[in-house]
């Protein structure tokens, strides 16, 4: 287990601005049209969140990630407004899968702006919903509040999960190390009892032989 906590401590030892910059950049890319399949934004966020060990760090990372997620959504939205449904036939969307674009469009038709919030928590679809919203003609003043709400909730959830995972790994290692010492002590005691018992048996055997 020590290798895991060593890795987490090494990550925590990096300059916090660098961790925030990389996490924010990957989040921005992950939330932009289709780039989420190339940039591991969600995975990077969970990993970076293991460095969150205090409320101030949580708040700073929450702010950075939320702003970057909203910016990524807005870029996708404006790309959709600019190119419209032509994006469905673009090479990037074909590579991702047109069925995901159609699913995003259907979600927007049935749920409206609420779909922007819900899609934030749906893998694959969330990277296409902003562009699809722009292509569908949804007004930005309806899109933005839903995007902000989704980004804020999504980032808080993932930062919380990552932070808890990092703390749990250290706790498990401490318990594991403590258990190892207990097991070692038990093994020493058992070994001592076995040795003393064999010596006693050997002594009794010699005494019997002498009597005989």
Image: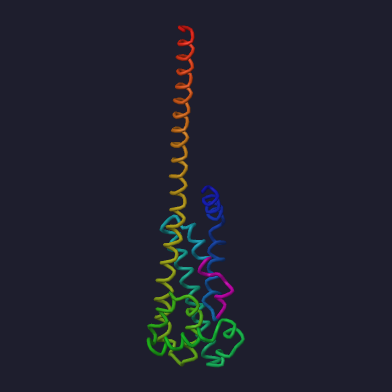
Residue that appears at 41% across and 67% down: 157
Q: Main secondary structure of the magenta part?
A: helix
Q: Where is residue 180 in the image (x, y as percent from the top left)?
A: 47, 39
State the count of labels: 0
**Residue that sits furthest to the front in the current view:** 212
Where are the magenta residues, as a range?
Answer: 34-43
Give the color scheme: rainbow, by chain, secondary structure or one colour. Answer: rainbow
Give percent across and percent down for residue 25. Answer: 56, 70
Does 42 appear in magenta?
yes
Q: Which residue does the image show at 59% across and 82% down from the upper left?
A: 95
Image quarter for residue 63? bottom left
Q: Which of 203 and 43 is in front in this view?
A: 203
Give the answer, above or below, for where 186 lies relative to 68: above
Is residue 40 highlighted in magenta? Answer: yes
Q: Position of residue 160 (x, y in %)?
A: 42, 62
For image coordinates 43% across by 90% down, the residue present is: 139
| Residue at horizontal 46 percent and vertical 92 percent from the top | 136
149 to 55, vertically: above or below = below
Counting from the top left corner in percent of width and height, residue 170 is at 46, 50
**Residue furthest out toward the top:** 211
Q: Tell me which corner region of the image, top left, top right, bottom left or bottom right, holds residue 112.
A: bottom left
């Amino acid at each position: 287990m020590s290798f895991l906590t060593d890795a987490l401590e090494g990550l925590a030892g990096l300059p916090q601005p660098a961790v925030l910059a990389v996490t924010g950049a990957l989040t921005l890319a992950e939330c932009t049209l289709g780039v989420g399949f190339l940039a591991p934004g969600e995975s990077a966020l969970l990993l970076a969140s293991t460095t969150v060990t205090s409320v101030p760090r949580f708040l700073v990372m929450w702010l950075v990630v939320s702003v970057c997620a909203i910016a990524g959504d807005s870029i996708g939205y404006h790309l959709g407004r600019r190119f419209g449904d032509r994006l469905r036939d673009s090479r990037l969307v074909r590579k991702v899968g047109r069925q995901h674009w159609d699913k995003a469009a259907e979600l927007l038709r049935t749920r409206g702006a609420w779909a922007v919030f819900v899609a934030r928590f749906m893998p694959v679809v969330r990277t296409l919903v902003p562009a699809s919203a722009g292509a569908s003609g949804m007004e930005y003043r309806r899109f933005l509040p839903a995007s902000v709400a989704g980004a804020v909730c999504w980032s808080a959830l993932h930062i919380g999960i990552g932070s808890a995972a990092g703390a749990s790994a250290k706790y498990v290692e401490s318990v594991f190390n403590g258990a190892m010492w207990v097991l070692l002590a038990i093994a020493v005691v058992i070994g001592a009892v076995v040795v003393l018992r064999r010596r006693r048996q050997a002594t009794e055997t010699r005494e019997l032989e002498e009597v005989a």
